[in-house]
Amino acid sequence: MKEIALLRIALVGVGAPATCAVLIAHAAATAPVPAACATPEAMQFDFWLGTWDLRWKNADGTGGNGRNRIERALDGCVIVENFESFQPEAGAPALRGLSVSTWDPRAAQWKQTWVDNTGAYLDFVGGWRDGRMVLARNEEHNGKRSMQRMVFRDIGADTLVWDWQSSTDSGATFTTQWQIEYRRAK
């Protein structure tokens, strides 16, 4: 009842948008994490949380860099990624994208959806394999089937390596298309 009274006073005295933002922030900060989102499996992506400085080599041989901000949202049940490149390849726009990832206890796997400013929509599933986080998807382009995957490896407290890989032989072998070195931002 006290919060409802505060809401009425705030709506009259300050304005609804500011008040709603404060109440939503308060509710998010005090809401307990649902049990399904607090399991060891649901915490497997916690190594990725935080703000990261990124470096990579572009296909043209130039160096690229960017920033990735990763945080929990929706009562701790979703990992949200906000990616931005600062030095794209010559003639290309800066890549900006976001993903949402969640542990699906019914399927016993991680699921991720990526969208970006090129119009891409990619969906992945996976989990921990051999000390690495691996998320994969099947792709069909011009009638040719391939597998694509992301591999998070060499994971330390302040560093990790991310590989974007593809396979044209049903996953027997993979070729790394893009490798990003992550370093935790200071």
Image (spheres, rainbow, N blue to C red):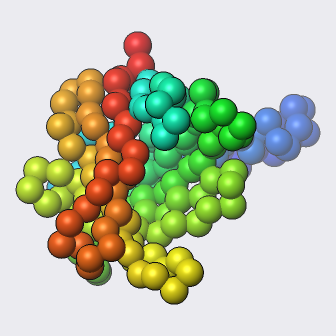
Nearer to the camera, 73 or 60: 60
Q: How many marks?
A: 0
Classify residue 20 as left or right of residue 101: right
Q: Residue at x 89, y 32 (%)?
A: 13
Residue 51, given in percent of the width and then of the height, sits at 44, 28
Quadrant placement of the C terminus: top left
Spot the residue most to the top.
186
Where is 39 relative to 104, above or below? above
Where is 77 relative to 16, above or below? below
Spot the residue most to the front.
60
Classify residue 80 as left or right of residue 88: left
Q: Residue at x 42, y 59 (%)?
A: 101
Q: Which picture quadrant has residue 96?
A: top right
Where is 45 relative to 113, above or below? above
Residue 43, given in percent of the width and then of the height, sits at 25, 51
Residue 162, given in percent of the width and then of the height, sits at 32, 43
Q: Residue at x 38, y 75 (%)?
A: 146
Does the image show residue 100?
Answer: yes
Nearer to the camera, 107 or 37: 107
Does the image show residue 51?
Answer: no
Spot the residue most to the bottom.
143
